Amino acid sequence: MSAPKLWRGRTLDDRSAERREQLVDVGFDLLGTDGAVAVTMRAVTRLANLSPRYFYESFGDRHALIIAVYDRLETELLTRLSAAAPDPDPNITIRSALEICAAYFEEDPRRARVLLREPLTDDALRRHSAGRLPIFLRTVVPALGDQIAALLPDSEETLAITGTALSGALVALYLDWIDGQLRVPRNRLVDAGTEIVLSLTRTRT
């Protein structure tokens, strides 16, 4: 087999992957700053200084790019949560996980807009994020230890209901905090989030 053709030391696949990441970077900035309506093919390619054909090389449409941005941030947050050391006390573990989320959003408020606010207004992102929630819980919770994993319901239906309830409460809490409407220090925010999680799981059990 012949070796892949190189251009300035990079293969065509390398260059394509680099352009894709460039488009996702621009998509993140637009989505996190001005929302889904700002993410258009024209705006993205103009800011990335790429032609439209390179956009369609990686994405079928603007919704595919928006979802790619969402998935990148979700993966980043999941990686941080999975690296957290579980504690025998589930209260401490839950608090630690919520602290990680708060720090992640506080470092760059655009992340909160992408993961929390835009799924409330963009139909494609709403459907995508709703379908991802049970998977997210099934992935993250076991990594937080056996005590937390025991809180997961066996039924997928019950998991969906519990996840929706938790998501609604925590999303509202974090968004109001990031937006400055909830003027409390981060530790108080995390305390409140922990109380919400424990309250809902106790109700289920």
Image (tube, rainbow, N blue to C red):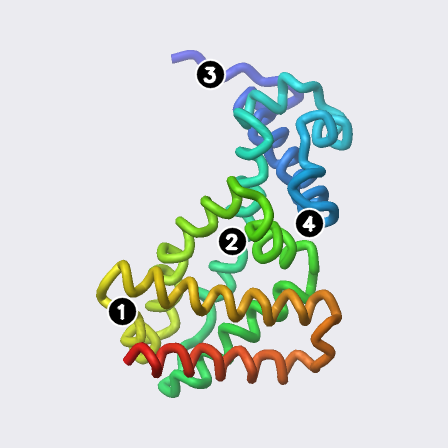
Give the spatial CA distance, label 1 vs label 3: 52 Å
- Return the mark for residue 32: 4
Q: Where the C terminus falls, by quadrant?
A: bottom left
Q: Residue at x 69, y 67 (%)?
A: 178
Q: Which one is closest to the eye, mark 3 or mark 2? A: 2
The residue under label 3 is which amino acid type? Ala
Q: Which one is closest to the eye, mark 2 or mark 1? A: 1
Left or right of 145? Residue 184 is right
Circle 4 SS class: helix
Q: Earlier in the sequence, mark 2 or mark 4?
A: 4
* Residue tagged 3: 3
Circle 2 SS class: helix
Q: Which one is closest to the eye, mark 1 or mark 3? A: 1
Depth order, front residue of 89/65: 65
Give the spatial CA distance, label 1 vs label 4: 33 Å
* Residue tagged 1: 153
Q: Earlier in the sequence, mark 3 or mark 4?
A: 3
Circle 3 SS class: loop
How far across and down, in percent of the image, does residue 80 sit? 51, 63
How far across and down, in percent of the image, does residue 51 sit? 70, 19
Give the spatial CA distance, label 2 vs label 1: 22 Å
Give the spatial CA distance, label 3 vs label 4: 40 Å
* Residue tagged 2: 74
Give the spatial CA distance, label 3 vs label 2: 36 Å
Q: Above or below — where is 53 with respect to 159?
A: above
Q: How many marks?
A: 4
Marks 4 and 2: in contact by CB < 8 Å? no
Q: Earlier in the sequence, mark 3 or mark 2?
A: 3
Q: Earlier in the sequence, mark 1 or mark 3?
A: 3
Give the spatial CA distance, label 2 vs label 4: 14 Å
